[in-house]
Image (cartoon, rainbow, N blue to C red):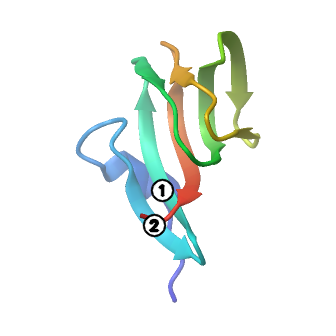
């Protein structure tokens, strides 16, 4: 299987904040997306979700607490915990969650 340039895939996406599935592993899927500084609304899932910042910075509000996830860092949101993306998030993000 060939390698994938995740930064290039994210940059080529037609819209920011629209993820693209790059792989499925077991019961999980890996999705890449481009962040553009705009906020995203609060959401809650019935499953754990992991965020890996490949480049840039992800600004999250998790259960009302603001935090920053820098390039090279991983943050996991537990199932049932409300979270939102705050304004100012930019770069390339990898999301790991259950495959649909």
Q: Compared with residue 66, is residue 13 higher up or lower down, i.e. above or below?
A: below
Q: Do residues under tags 2 and 1 come within 8 Å of each other at their CB atoms?
A: yes
Whole-percent x, y for residue 81 in the image: 63, 29
Left or right of residue 84: residue 64: right
Q: Which residue is drawn at 52% across and 40% down?
A: 45
Image quadrant in which you'd find residue 20: bottom left
Whole-percent x, y for residue 67 in the image: 71, 17
Q: Residue at x 60, y 27 (%)?
A: 58
**Residue underneath mark 2:** 22
Q: Which residue lies furthest to the right in this view?
A: 73
Q: Residue at x 70, y 21 (%)?
A: 68
Left or right of residue 78: residue 95: left
Left or right of residue 89: residue 21: left
Image quadrant in which you'd find residue 61: top right
Q: In which quarter of the image is the C terminus?
A: bottom left
Sequence-wise, the earlier of marks 2 and 1 is: 2
Q: How crowded is mark 2: few (under 14 residues within 10 Å), some or many (20 or more)?
A: some
- In the structure shown, which secondary structural element does the residue marked by tag 1 occupy? strand
**Residue underneath mark 1:** 31
Q: Which residue lies furthest to the left in this view?
A: 14
Numbered badge on residue 88: none
Return the residue nearer the eye: 51 or 73.
Answer: 51
Q: Residue furthest bottom?
A: 1
Whole-percent x, y for residue 37 in the image: 44, 19
């Amino acid at each position: 299987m060939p390698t994938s340039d995740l930064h290039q895939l994210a940059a080529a996406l037609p819209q920011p904040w629209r993820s693209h599935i790059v792989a499925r592993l077991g019961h999980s899927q890996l999705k890449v997306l481009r962040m553009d500084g705009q906020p995203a609304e609060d959401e809650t899932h019935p499953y754990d979700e992991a965020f890996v910042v490949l480049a840039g910075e992800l600004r999250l509000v998790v259960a009302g607490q603001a935090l920053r996830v820098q390039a090279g860092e991983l943050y996991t949101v537990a199932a049932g915990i409300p979270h939102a993306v705050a304004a100012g998030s930019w770069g390339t993000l990898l999301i790991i969650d259950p495959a649909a």
